[in-house]
Image (spheres, helix red, strand yellow):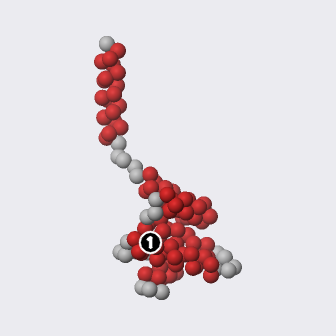
């Protein structure tokens, strides 16, 4: 009897686990980093993205880190080092996926223009 109950438990809860959508951990980390960025916590976003890129590089992570670093540059008294880092991240992202674009509804027009300049060889 105990064996039947255990089997029924496994079948019922196993089916539930299978029916749940798979959440890609990398996507969840990227989303969390974007939320930190959107909330103005650029330092936390930069740290999270740098950690992601060390373990699993992706074009999207480079793209977002470039946006974060551009924003940090605009908030800095000495923007040049961060602008260079933003350019490098955008170039790395585009090397992985040439078709990348920044959503004009999610990012500032100046950031989008900077990205487009890099994308066009600047």
Q: Is residue 82 left or right of residue 35?
A: right
Residue 13 visible in the picture: yes
* Residue drawn 40% across the image and 52% down it: 24
Taking the image as shown, residue 68 lies to the left or right of residue 15, namely right
- Residue 36 drawn at (x, y percent): 56, 60
Q: Is residue 97 left or right of residue 43?
A: left
Above or below 49: residue 19: above
Which is more toward the observer, 95 or 4?
Answer: 95
Q: Which residue is mark 1?
A: 93
Q: Write the residue at 30% across / 29% down.
A: 11
Total number of numbered labels?
1
Q: Quadrant of the N terminus?
A: top left
Residue toward you, 96 or 28: 96
- Picture layout, residue 28 above or below residue 10: below
Q: Position of residue 14 (x, y in %)?
A: 33, 33
Q: Position of residue 80 (x, y in %)?
A: 62, 81
Q: Residue at x 32, y 17 (%)?
A: 3
Q: Quadrant of residue 15?
A: top left
Residue at (44, 72) in percent of width and height: 93
Who is closer to the viewer here, 76 or 47?
A: 47
Percent across and percent down for residue 116 are 44, 82
- Mark 1, secondary structure of its residue: helix
Sort mark 1 into few (<14), some (14-19) or many (20+) by Cα contacts within 10 Å: many
Eyeballing the image, is 33 above or below 93?
A: above
Residue farthest along the right direction in this orientation: 77
Above or below 62: residue 79: below
Please, which residue is most extreme toward the front here? 54
């Amino acid at each position: 009897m105990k064996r039947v109950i255990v089997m029924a438990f496994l079948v019922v809860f196993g089916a539930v686990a299978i029916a749940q959508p798979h959440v890609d951990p990398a996507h969840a980390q990227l989303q969390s980093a974007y939320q930190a960025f959107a909330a103005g916590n650029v330092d936390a976003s930069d740290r999270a993205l740098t950690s992601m890129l060390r373990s699993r590089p992706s074009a999207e992570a480079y793209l977002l880190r470039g946006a974060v670093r551009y924003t940090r540059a605009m908030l800095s008294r000495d923007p040049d080092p961060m602008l260079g880092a933003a350019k490098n991240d955008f170039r790395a992202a585009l090397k992985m996926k040439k078709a990348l674009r920044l959503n004009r509804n999610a990012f500032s027009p100046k950031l989008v223009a900077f990205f487009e300049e890099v994308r066009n060889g600047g």
